[in-house]
Amino acid sequence: MAFFNQSPYVKITFRSPTKLLLLALTLSSCASLEERLCNQTTAFQKGYDDVINGRQGSPGLKEGEACKKSEKFAYADFHRDYMAGFNKAKINHCSSSNASKIGQKDAATHKEFRASLNTLAVCIADADIKVNLESFYEVAFRKEFCQPFRAKSLGAKDAQNFGDKKNTEETFELCAYQKKELYKSYLASYAENIKVQCTPARAASLASQNAREKKALSEGLLLLEKCPGTLSSSLASVYSSAYQSERTNMLEEERIRMEQERLNREEANQQELLRIKRKQLELEEQKYKNPNPI
């Protein structure tokens, strides 16, 4: 019994079961984390992922420091398998063909030049292959970007939802002597696709959307100015009328909602009064039945 009284661990057991449960859960959580992290598969994947995601500084390896306390899979084991994954990824990822794929994809999805070059950050950190990879990326980007159909595609994309038009041929600066022709293709595509947006139905739809989102009337009118010639002014009239109509509808909906809330409150109050009256009647009935309660 003396041992039980002197042991702080036994005190937790007998006097604070909640603390013991929390301690058990904490230890279980730590053990679970160690099992998930401190193994060959995870260490290899951490190294692989650091490379293909362009994570410099080996953050995955730093996570492995938690394995320093592991008895089954020490940090040295984690480091070995991490580097195996790291080097495997460099072979696959840090290649001229992959740099070309990334460059081609950036151009095809209308991303800025060098937008995804950061995914090659770990590779480019190696001075021996930096220039080579950047060169393959740039060649592939230019080849994909500097094509008439790509300029038309970019024009169509910018025209969607009354997007802004690029106002300079420097957009195609990477394409050198082709940039003037490409910019012409871009402008023609933008003009063609902006017309698709410039219809009374689209103006009315835009007005309804902007009114619902509580945007200023002027925001939509500015967008409609991108429509050609007299079409802009006629659509502005349609837009303004639809906007005001939608705002009127919203105010009416709000009035109906508030009126419904008022009616609901009145009904709730009436129900409460009825409940109180019923309770009073019950009490009166009990007094009548038992005039002289003991």
Image (spheres, rainbow, N blue to C red):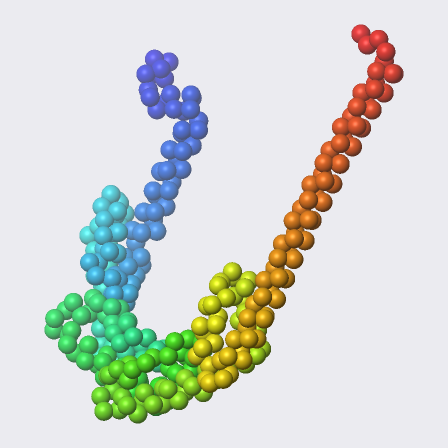
- Residue farthest toward the right in the current orientation of the protein: 289
Task: Tell me: residue 71, above or below residue 22.
Answer: below
Q: Is residue 29 left or right of residue 95?
A: right
Image location (x, y in percent) of residue 103? 28, 78
Q: Is residue 278 left or right of residue 158?
A: right
The residue nearer to you, when weighing 237 against 186, is 237
Residue 263's image quarter? top right
* Residue at x-position 48% and y-position 72%: 221
Image location (x, y in percent) of residue 37? 31, 52
Image location (x, y in percent) of residue 130? 15, 73
Image location (x, y in percent) of residue 218? 47, 68
The residue nearer to you, when weighing 171 against 215, is 215
* Residue at x-position 84% and y-position 8%: 292
Asked whether the viewer can see residue 261, the reply is yes
- Figure quadrant of the C terminus: top right
The residue nearer to you, when weighing 31 against 118, is 118
Q: Is residue 66 left or right of residue 237?
A: left
Residue 71's image quarter? top left
